Image (spheres, rainbow, N blue to C red):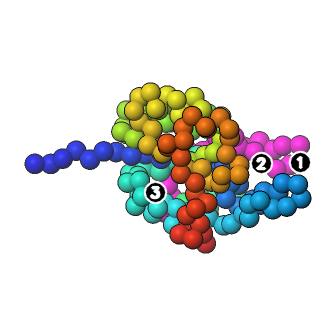
Amino acid sequence: MKVNKQKTYTFIDSQNLNLGTSKDIHKKGKIIYKGWKLDFKKFRRYLSDKFRVDKAFLCIGYIKQNEGLYKKLKNDGYELIFKPTVKDHEGKSKGNVDAELVLHAAAVEFSRYDKAVVVSGDGDFYCLYEFLEDNHKLLRILIPNSKSESSLLRPFQKYKTFIEFEKKKLEK
């Protein structure tokens, strides 16, 4: 007899993950968090091994010059959800992917998975976490580091995992 396997999808805010792991955080002139370089291939394997993630959706701003990176990420097992980027006042590309992540988790992919893992320490996803919890689909919230976690995530303590504590397994 074949048993139906629970499908688990992850939805990743690429900028929050990248900046949350790689940037140093200072407080009163002292470094309270030392950034490190995440290995995305190791991270994809970690998602599969630890949370049994079937599909990993990486929400990312699209920049034509990054085609090589996108190809590598696809080869590493990510499905990319692109957001067009715009230039800020300093000429840096910005592609806020919050709406894309919420849309895919709560509508586009919602009927295709049983449990969701969301990767972001951003409080902007509070309504998504609430929605997933109410629908018994929230498995975990993976937060890049404990120093930049939004205080809005306090009600979701039982779902939190901090990526910084897996640094030895996940760094380049």
Residue under the image location 61 percent in, 38 percent down: 153
Q: Give the residue at mark 3.
A: 47
Q: Which mark is residue 90?
A: 1
Front position in the image: 139 or 108: 139
Give how far apart the Cα atoms at labels 3 and 1 are. 35 Å
User: Whole-percent x and y of residue 93?
Assistant: 77, 48
Give how far apart the Cα atoms at labels 2 and 3 are. 28 Å
Residue under the image location 49 percent in, 43 percent down: 159
Residue under the image location 60 percent in, 32 percent down: 126
Front position in the image: 78 or 86: 78
Residue 93 magenta-drawn?
Answer: yes
Residue under the image location 59 percent in, 66 percent down: 167
Give the amino acid type for the residue marked by disc 1 in the picture. Glu
Give the amino acid type for the residue marked by disc 2 in the picture. Ser
Contact, mark 2 vs mark 3 (Cβ under 8 Å): no
Specify the segment rendered in magenta: 74-97
Q: Considering only vertical position in the picture, is 106 above or below 97? A: above
Q: Nearer the viewer, mark 3 or mark 1?
A: 3
Front position in the image: 34 or 95: 34
**Which quarter of the rendered picture does the C terminus lie within?**
bottom right
Q: Which mark is residue 93?
A: 2
